[in-house]
Image (cartoon, rainbow, N blue to C red):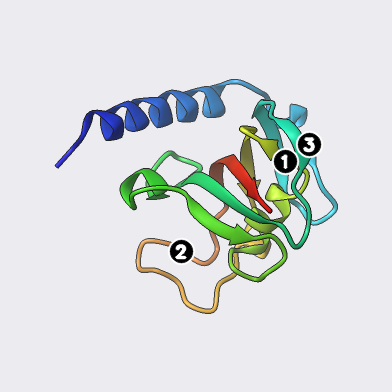
Amino acid sequence: MMTVKNIISLIFLALVMFHCTSSKLESDLIATNSGLRYEIIKPGTGPIAKEGDEVLIEESTTYLGGTLIFSTDRTGGPLKVKIGGNQVIDGLDEGLRGMKQAEVRRLIVPPSLSKRSQYPSNVHPDSTLLYVVELVKILK
């Protein structure tokens, strides 16, 4: 059953995804040595997340064409992740480093940074993925 909170979250996600796919040229994105590209959609505040920190995140994953693969809106809330703990793909792990609380980033993750030991049926191993991630809280 869709609650008002879920409907609002889905509308927010749709607006963020629209903004993310139309806002900046690829050349305006920050590129790391690993091949990750990202932009800060909404700046955060407070301390910076670093390796070893446990964080709560809201995230959505799509193919570049916009097909939704995963969203925490559909799983009932934020994910708890230990940065550097091999709990998420390398591209997401790297993208979380340096974020502040309430910051939202768009990450473009190449296949080399999205390798998994097993692939869900809806994820192709050679795909570049688009993540929109919000760092909800750094846990201490």
Q: Tell me what residue is drawn at x 78 percent, y 53 percent.
A: 50
Residue 7 falls left or right of residue 132: left
Of the residues shown, which amino acid type is indicated by label 3?
Ile
Q: Residue at x 36, y 43 (%)?
A: 73
Q: How crowded is the residue under tag 2: few (<14 C-alpha within 10 Å), some, or many (20+)?
A: few
Identify the secondary structure beneath mark 3. strand
Judge from the rendering whether residue 51 lies leftward or rightward of residue 90; answer left or right.
Answer: right
Give how far apart the Cα atoms at labels 3 and 1 are: 14 Å
Q: Earlier in the sequence, mark 2 or mark 1?
A: 1
Q: CA distance from mark 2 to mark 1?
A: 28 Å
Q: Is residue 65 left or right of residue 31?
A: left
Q: Amino acid at mark 1?
A: Met
Q: Which mark is residue 99?
A: 1
Residue matched to label 2: 124
The residue lying furthest to the bottom in this view is 117
Residue 30 disc label: 3
Q: Position of residue 75 (x, y in %)?
A: 34, 52
Residue displayed at 69% across by 32% down: 39
* Quarter occupied by residue 114: bottom right
In terms of sequence position, does the residue under pointer 3 or pointer 1 come before the other?
Answer: 3
Residue 98 is at least partly visible in this image: yes
